[in-house]
Amino acid sequence: MSEILGLGIDIVEVPKMAGIISGRAGKSFIKKTFTEGEIAYAKGSAGKLAATFAAKEAAYKAFGTGWLEGKDVEVLHSSEGVPSIMLHGEIQKIAKKRRIGRLFVSLSYTDCCAAAVVALTR
């Protein structure tokens, strides 16, 4: 039986994300925040980037650390589109120390909003 060790949720306004990525600092923000795989998956979709960003935020909330480094939480998708999270860097060290067994993630977005929930289990 799994034990829930952390739960995080986040919501991002898709039009706000669209404004950020199309703005002056958009390319810098994308490069600093998202991995190459996340960028390729989104294909410029503000909704997909917003959902990915929400998942990163939700993961950090589940860990209770606050934002550490955008690329340390990577959102992956199976060939069927099922999302999962891979950890890198400092957050991966924290997960090992806390003996986190699995991360569950659920994403959703519309033209208006993107949301994500992340649960940490042992």
Image (cartoon, rainbow, N blue to C red):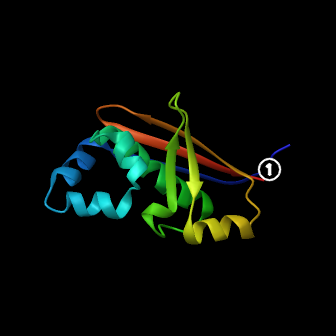
Residue 64 is situated, as x and y percent measured from the top left of the image, at 59, 65
Residue 8 is situated, as x and y percent measured from the top left of the image, at 57, 52
Q: Residue at x 42, y 47 (%)?
A: 52
Whether residue 86 sits left or right of residue 26 in the image: it is right
Q: Compare residues 108 and 99 and report the one nearer the observer.
A: 99
Q: Compare residues 119 and 42 and report the one nearer the observer.
A: 42
Whether residue 92 sits left or right of residue 101 in the image: it is left
User: Number of numbered discs present?
Assistant: 1
Whether residue 2 sits left or right of residue 89 in the image: it is right
What's the residue type where badge 1 is placed? Answer: Glu
Residue 94 is situated, as x and y percent measured from the top left of the image, at 66, 69
Q: Height in image: 88 above or below 37? A: below
Q: Circle 1: is it few (<14), some (14-19), or many (20+) Cα within 10 Å?
A: few
Label 1 residue SS: loop
Residue 19 is situated, as x and y percent measured from the top left of the image, at 19, 49
Name the residue at the top extreme. 80
Q: Residue at x 38, y 56 (%)?
A: 34
Q: Quadrant of residue 115?
A: top left
Q: Compare residues 97 and 81 and report the one nearer the observer.
A: 81
Q: Residue at x 55, y 33 (%)?
A: 82
Q: Residue at x 62, y 65 (%)?
A: 92
Please give the residue where the numbered disc 1 appears in the rendered image: 3
Q: Compare residues 8 and 30 and report the one nearer the observer.
A: 30
Name the residue at the right extreme. 1
Quadrant in which the N terminus is drawn: top right
Whether residue 100 sits left or right of residue 20 in the image: it is right
Q: Height in image: 76 above or below 34? A: above
